[in-house]
Image (cartoon, grey):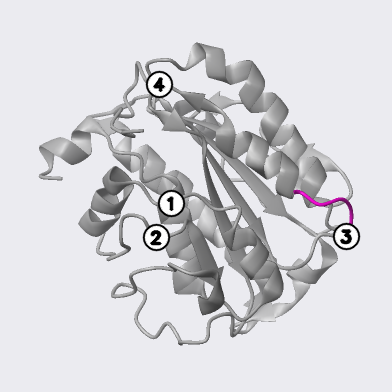
Amino acid sequence: MAYDKYATGDTPALIVYLIDISASMNQPLEGRSKIDWVNEAIERILITMVKRSTKGAIISPRYRVAMAAYSEEVYDILGGILPINEVVKLGHPTLSTDSATDTKLAFEWARDLLEAELPKLDDCPAPMVCHLTDGAYTHGDPAPIAHQIMHMENPDGNVLIENIYVGADLTYSPINDVEEWTGILEANELKNPHAQNLFRLSSNLPNGYANVLAEEGYKLSAGSRMIIPGSNSDLIELAFAMSQATPTRQFLLNGG
């Protein structure tokens, strides 16, 4: 699969966010709660999507966004899929925490949404599911559903899954410089067994995505797994940057 379709107003990229809002997201990370860092990162990435979609005073619907927060239920934050020019009118969401972690239910929600949307996306980039969590699931195993999603496809390629695992001290080798970090290639680079499980549910980073991230100052290698150990705010910000790194014609004109 080439993953060479550009995100444009006529062929928008679909990004589905699944955000764990279990009680553990209230735990501290760098002096603030994990959910505070996540709320800030969501605000920044929506701003970035708007910038990448704006020409003059016009915001092109270059991205389409769905967003679910989940605990023991799935909460559809946007009320369905919205183009980025409609999302910006709503303002950025502010998430608060709930109780348990039914990751399987969240992936089922994403799967059902994609099954309905994929027939309409023949000329669009392959969709992306960006999942953020900070711990073990408390209900059924999400792996079979995630694998179903990863085998779904359109002409551009299989649906991509990115996982963000928020927590401290997740890798055997510390990531001291986020901009120089080249990514995770093997599950045994991760200390946490739950993060290792998510490694197996993460896609390989396409070359076009790696090129866009390089334009933004990162050195993630094409082919590395799309899993980010979110042990600090810089890594969480990188993770959300990865989620919207679908190549665009604007990026091409800028030299990418």
Q: In this view, does 89 lie above or below 27?
A: above
Look at the image and tell me whether residue 76 can be seen: no
What amino acid does circle 1 point to?
Asn
Instruction: Give the Cα separation between the discs numbered 4 and 1.
Output: 17 Å
User: Which label belongs to residue 138?
Assistant: 3
Q: Is mark 3 on a helix, strand or loop?
A: loop
Q: In this view, does 58 lie above or below 147?
A: above
Q: In which quarter of the image is residue 12?
A: top left
Whether pointer 2 and pointer 1 mark residues with C-beta atoms closer than 8 Å, the reply is yes
Q: In this view, does 8 lie to the left or right of 40?
A: left
Whether pointer 2 and pointer 4 mark residues with C-beta atoms closer than 8 Å, the reply is no
What amino acid does circle 4 point to?
Pro
Point out residue 56 in the picture as x, y percentages from the top left corner.
22, 30
Instruction: Give the Cα separation between the discs numbered 2 and 4.
Output: 22 Å
Q: In which quarter of the image is residue 139?
A: bottom right
What amino acid does circle 2 point to?
Ser
Report which residue position mark 4 lands on: 155
Location of the C terminus (image quadrant): top left
Estimate how packed mark 1 is, as few (under 14), some (14 to 19) or many (20 or more) residues with alpha carbons within 10 Å. some
Instruction: Give the Cα separation between the discs numbered 3 and 2.
Output: 28 Å
Instruction: Give the Cα separation between the discs numbered 4 and 3.
Output: 35 Å
Report which residue position mark 1 lands on: 204
- Which of the two discs, 4 and 3, sits closer to the camera? 4
Estimate how packed mark 2 is, as few (under 14), some (14 to 19) or many (20 or more) residues with alpha carbons within 10 Å. some
Q: Is mark 1 on a helix, strand or loop?
A: loop
Magenta stretch?
A: 138-142
Mark 2 or mark 1, earlier in chain: 1
Residue at horizontal 44%, vertical 72%? 234
